[in-house]
Image (cartoon, rainbow, N blue to C red):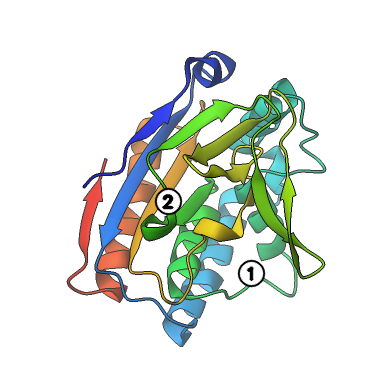
Amino acid sequence: MTLTLTVSDEVRALAPGFTHVAIEAHGLVNGPSTEASSALLDDAARRLAVRLGGRAPHEDPHMIAWRDTYTAFGSKPSRTRNSAEALAKRALTEAGLPRINVLVDLYNAISVAHLVPVGGEDLDRVQGGMRLVRATGTEDFVTVAGGEETVEHPDAGEVVWCDDAGVTCRRWNWRQGPRTRLTEESTSAIFLLECLAPMPAAESEAAGAELAELLEKFCPGARITVR
């Protein structure tokens, strides 16, 4: 069954240039990071450096649009960076990008190479459909702090992804909750590439196609749908 994804009218009014590419995948095989997935991350960092041409990530037009949008819903973009800017900042350091697991490595590589926020959720852990909404402030966001599970609540008006069980990602794509994240045992996933104007639709579609190709390469036989 195809996962239902909806974007609320309030979010569309906040960011009328928002589009997303969704990749639903079943029959995946995940595991610890490999030499091949690690090499993709290194290559993505090189592609990013060429793309930026000496600029800082936050000076890229797409990242400027995300910063403006974060400011519009009351978040400080220099403190809570969108996921693509945060990854890009790490990619340009000596330590480089973190190695998490194969599937996360793949979508992080696409995020950095194309400078577009990309998230991955374990479909077997998502309850009901997924919705991008402006929070009321009463929703539950289950996370881990100090090694202990804790419940936070988003700010009123904050943009969040949620399902029937609560918030899955705070501040649009700033921090994912542990409940739906991809683990080495994950076999089904939804990947979301999130784009704002001025990024052309063709570029976001090309990034999605590249991620789909990588999933097919690393998980032969997986059933993949791009929409």
Quadrant, the C terminus:
top left
Residue drawn at x 72%, y 39% is 153
Mark 2, residues whose alpha carbon is within 10 Å: few (<14), some, or many (≥20)?
many
The x and y percentages for residue 117 are: 54, 46
Mark linked to residue 130? none
Distance of label 2 from label 1 (alpha carbons):
27 Å
Residue drawn at x 35%, y 49% is 208
Q: Are marks 2 and 1 in contact (CB under 8 Å)?
A: no
The x and y percentages for residue 102 are: 44, 75
Q: In this figure, which residue is indicated by the disc labeled 2?
A: 126
Q: Is residue 213 left or right of residue 78?
A: left
Q: Is residue 136 left or right of residue 164?
A: right
The x and y percentages for residue 223 are: 19, 61
Label 2 secondary element: loop
Q: In this figure, which residue is indicated by the disc labeled 1?
A: 97
Residue drawn at x 33%, y 41% is 205
Residue 15 in which image quadrant: top right
Give the number of the mark in front: 2 or 1.
Answer: 2
